[in-house]
Amino acid sequence: MQRIVGAAAAAVVVSLAGIATAGAQTWRTIDASRQARDTSAVATHIEYAAGKFDLKPAAGGLLYSTNVRYDADRAEPVADFDAASRVISLGVHLRGMHLTNVDDQHDAGSMHAELSGSVPMDLSLELGAVEADLQLGGLRLTDLSLRSGAADVTARFDQPNRERLRSMTLQVGAADVKLLDVANSGVSRIVAEVGAGSLSIDLGGALQHDVDITATLAIGGLKLNVSPDVGLFVDEKTVLGSFHKDGFTKRADGWYSDGYDKAVRHVRVHLHAFMGGLELTRVQR
């Protein structure tokens, strides 16, 4: 993994400021940014292990910008663009630690990132013990992957996604993850795995396409909101988990909501649950 690079990278601006020492910790603040030179597609990977993190679309002609406050004694910031592979790497790397063994004692840092809304983007996020606010509306996302450990994450599509989102992959450990206004993303396929945490997906807006959801639940839960004018199908393979079937009719291959055949748009849920459950609401947003 490449780290922060300096003046040798012509299109990148990096500044270091605000060095402060507290006990065994040395806190630093760093800013990095890069101008977009074209609108060719990129892949962006963001890894942040602990602290507060927010993400939103960038203004002007920036490809990305980031501001990070980190403990220099045990962390190293990452801000790099590989022009050959067209991969953006952002975040903070904790030396000798991984997302699975980070706890909330390491939450004093912070990271703010902005990404271009002019470039088609495959976005991948790996978040540990993080409190995150993600404003994804207005970007040009083609694929989205979110892996979260013990995070508290809210992701919003307040504005329409400016590209068709082919797939959304969600891995939720012991986290609480909420995705709001997902209809604005234009997503066609969602794959979700929930361990002991909670995942909430709001599809209450006007869907642009039918949506297929495959959800695997261990002991955590999935809350799904779908507009009442959308046909909803659930195929469940469960041990102890299930969902309330009021307003559904059983057919050979699964459960169909009332009026499914007349609906213009459909959401199809393939549910695999051990102890986790599916909670459905039908609220128009």
Image (spheres, grey):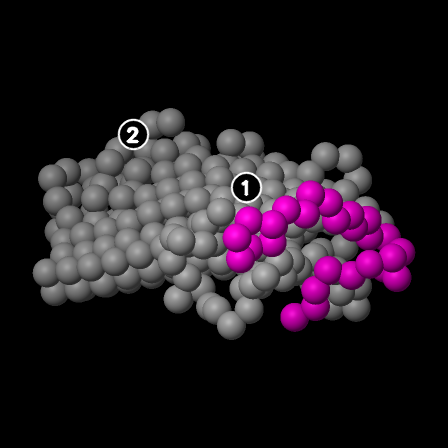
Q: CA distance from mark 1 to mark 2?
A: 28 Å
Label 2 environment density (alpha carbons within 10 Å; few <14, some 14–19, many ≥20):
some
Is 3 on the left-hand or right-hand side of 49?
Answer: right
Q: Residue furthest top?
A: 285
Q: State the residue at coordinates (39%, 66%).
A: 101
Kindly state the secondary structure of the residue where label 2 is placed: loop
Kindly state the secondary structure of the residue where label 1 is placed: strand
Is 160 on the left-hand or right-hand side of 200?
Answer: right
Q: Which residues are magenta?
A: 1-27
Indicate yes or no whether the magenta region holds residue 16.
yes
Task: Find residue 54 and name its label.
Answer: 1
Relative depth, front residue between 165 and 17: 17
Task: Find residue 283 and name its label.
Answer: 2
Residue 157 in picture, x, y percent from top left? 50, 37
Quadrant location, the N terminus: bottom right
Residue 25 in picture, x, y percent from top left? 55, 55
